[in-house]
């Protein structure tokens, strides 16, 4: 469903993504894990066509990502960022329906889809009528998830979607996202700094460092890796005696 073949991205002399080759099968969840600046979020922006690669090729849902195809690709991908990325002058409802309205969906179709999504992401009609400033962090993130799912895309990209939430809200949203991924059978690429979150939401984990993939496998594989960086990363989050 998602493939990267020898993908590279440079910002000036700095190599942010270095010859990345990665395949994400349909209906699976991959968690991209690693320290800040290792290239995780850049990979998502490349897949969306928001950045152009300096080498290699990418396909999403069978479409080669190019400047010409980027708009078409984005309509087949749901994108969720930290704090939802909502427009403050629009209600939650209008934020969620923004792209559907742009594509000419009628009111009845929009209403029906929002009713489905409201139930799925646990947002009632009263909450959807509010503006982002009137919502909690968890509610804003749920609106962002609803917007990403509005067109029923086969692929979801999530960039640190729960990084700004307090632990209890984060845990509830994690449980709901795991349920949504399973129910809708989406192909998911999730960026996170959290080892536990990667283990919970990802079928596999991809550990990155300085633009490279260091390890790919299950959390069990990472915990038993012989690679020095992998061991250090795991111990830093779990503790050396874990």
Image: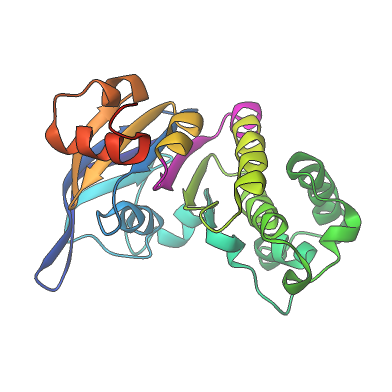
Q: Position of residue 82 (x, y in %)?
A: 53, 60
* Towards the viewer: 192 or 104: 192
Rendering colour mode: rainbow
Find out whether residue 190 is within the magenta segment. yes
For the record, the magenta segment spans: 180-194
Badge count: 0
Q: Residue at x 13, y 74 (%)?
A: 12
Q: Can see residue 38?
A: yes
* Towards the viewer: 240 or 65: 240
Q: Position of residue 93 (x, y in %)?
A: 79, 62
Relative side of 241 to 99, left or right: left
Q: Is residue 25 above or below residue 172?
A: above
Residue 217's image quarter?
top left
Task: Locate the N terminus by quadrant.
Answer: top left
User: Seen from this angle, which residue lies furthest right?
Assistant: 126
Q: Is residue 68 above or below residue 124?
A: below
Find out whether residue 117 is within the magenta segment. no
User: Seen from this angle, which residue lies furthest bottom?
Assistant: 89
Q: Residue at x 20, y 40 (%)?
A: 213
Q: Position of residue 210 (x, y in %)?
A: 17, 53
Q: Is residue 156 above or below residue 110?
A: above
User: Seen from this angle, which residue lies furthest front?
Assistant: 241
Relative side of 240 to 89, left or right: left
Q: Position of residue 236 (x, y in %)?
A: 30, 41
Q: Residue at x 67, y 37 (%)?
A: 176
Q: Can see residue 24?
A: no
Relative side of 209 to 30, left or right: left
Task: Locate the C terminus by quadrant.
Answer: top left
Residue 130's image quarter?
bottom right
């Amino acid at each position: 469903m998602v493939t990267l073949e020898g993908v590279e991205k440079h910002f000036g002399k700095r190599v942010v993504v270095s010859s990345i080759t990665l395949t994400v099968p349909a209906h699976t969840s991959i968690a991209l894990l690693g320290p800040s600046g290792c290239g995780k979020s850049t990979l998502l922006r490349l897949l969306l066509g928001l950045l152009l690669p300096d080498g290699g090729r990418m396909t999403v849902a069978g479409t080669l990502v190019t400047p010409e195809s980027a708009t078409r690709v984005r309509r087949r991908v749901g994108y969720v960022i930290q704090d939802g990325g909502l427009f403050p002058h629009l209600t939650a409802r209008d934020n969620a329906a923004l792209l559907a309205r742009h594509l000419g969906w009628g009111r009845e179709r929009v209403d029906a889809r929002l009713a489905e999504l409201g139930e799925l992401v646990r947002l009632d009609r009263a909450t959807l009528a509010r503006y982002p400033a009137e919502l909690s962090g968890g509610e804003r993130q749920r609106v962002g998830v609803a917007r990403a799912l509005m067109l029923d895309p086969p692929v979801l990209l999530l960039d640190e979607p729960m990084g700004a939430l307090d632990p209890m809200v984060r845990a509830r949203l994690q449980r709901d996202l795991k349920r949504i991924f399973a129910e809708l059978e989406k192909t998911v690429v999730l960026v996170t700094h959290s080892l536990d979150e990667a283990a919970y939401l990802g079928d596999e984990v991809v550990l990155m460092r300085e633009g490279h993939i260091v390890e790919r496998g299950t959390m069990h594989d990472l915990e038993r890796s012989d690679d020095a960086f992998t061991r250090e990363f795991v111990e830093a989050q779990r503790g050396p005696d874990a």
